Amino acid sequence: MKRREYDRATSGQVGPKIIPIIQEIPKEQAVTFIQQYHYSKVMPRLNKFFLGFFMEGRLSGVVALGWGTQPLQTIRKLFPLHVLKTTDYIEIGKMCFLPGCNNTQYFGSLVISQMVKWLKANTRYLYLYTLADGIMGKCGYVYQASNFHYVGSFTTSVYRDSLTGEKIHPRSARILLEENAAFDGVARRYWLTFSYCQYKGIEKINGRMFRYLYPLTKSGRRILQSYPEYQGLAYPKDKDLCFTMRSAPGTYVPIPQPQFNKEVCQFNVQRY
C-alpha cells in the first residue's frame, strides 16, 4: 500500500495554527531525538513506524509506533469476546516534542490529529492504543483532548536507584534479577526482592497506568461499543494519581509523586 503524507489540515483551534508535516524518518534520527527530549531513554523493542513531525522544515516531534512487551495479550485482554490479533492495533511507544512545542496547549493535539489521518490512509489497523504513565504524573490529558476513549487503568511497578534517582524499568533489570537469584540461591527471580533491593539501595515504587484507545475504522468503533464496561468512563485527573513505595516485604506505603533523574543510565543501557 502506497503511503500518503499529510501537510495541511484543520486543527480545531481558534485562530490560524501551523500544522506539522508528517513523514516517516530513519530509526537513528528518531532514537537520537527521543534520547534527547523524552523523559525516559528506554526504547520499546518492537517498533513498526518512526514518524517525524516538521514545523517550517525543523523536526519538532517524533512518535515511535509499535507494540509493548506482550502485544497479543494486550489486545486480547482489552477485547476478550473477540479474537483480535496484533495486526489489529498499533501502540504509541514514544512521543516527544521540542521543549518549545511541548509547552503549548495545542501542539500535541495537532500531532495526534495528523498521525490518526496518516494511519487511516496508510494502514489497516482497527485501533491506535496508548498508555499514560501515571508514575510520571501523567493522566493522558493530550489523549483526552484528542477524543481518545479511556478504557481503564492498572497498577504497575518501577525501581529507582536511591542514590542517583535513576528510574529502572523492570525490562532493564535482567542483570539485577540474575544477581538477585544468585543472591537468594534460586534459579530465577521475576521481581527484585525486598532484601536484595535494600542491599543494592534500590526502591520499588507502584503507580497507575491509564489505557486509551482511538478507533481507526468503523469496525473498530462497533467492537468498542459492544463492551459496556468501556462506555462513559470518566477521564482520569490529577486526583486519580497514586504512588506507593515498598517499605517491607509485601507492604507499601503512600508517597508523594516520585522524582527521577533521566540523565543517569547506569542500568537502562540499550543497543540500537
Image (cartoon, rainbow, N blue to C red):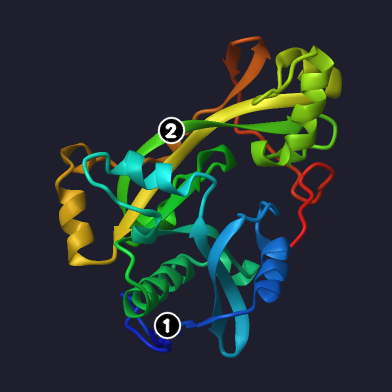
Secondary structure under tag 2 reads strand
Residue 234: x %, y % from top left: 27, 40
User: Residue 204, how many percent across, how many down?
Assistant: 67, 25
Amino acid type indicated by mark 2:
Phe
Q: How crowded is mark 1: few (under 14 residues within 10 Å), some or many (20 or more)?
A: some
- Residue 75 visible from this viewpoint: yes
Q: Is 82 placed left or right of 188 in the picture?
A: left
Identify the residue under disc 1: 17
Q: Is residue 222 above or below residue 73?
A: below
Left or right: residue 144 compared with residue 83: right
Q: Position of residue 95 (x, y in %)?
A: 55, 62
| Residue at the farthest front position | 187
> In front of the other: label 2 or label 1?
2
Name the residue rendered at 67%, 51% in the picture.
40
Residue 178: give x, y in percent of width and height.
Answer: 78, 28
As shown in the figure, which amino acid type bears the numbered disc 1? Lys
Front residue of 170/136: it is 170
Q: Residue at x 71, y 41 (%)?
A: 172
The quarter of the rendered structure image containing the C terminus is bottom right
**Residue 6 seen in the current view:** no
Question: Closer to the N terminus: mark 2 or mark 1?
Answer: 1
**Quadrant where the image shows the N terminus:** bottom left
Query: Which residue carries the number 2 mark?
Result: 154
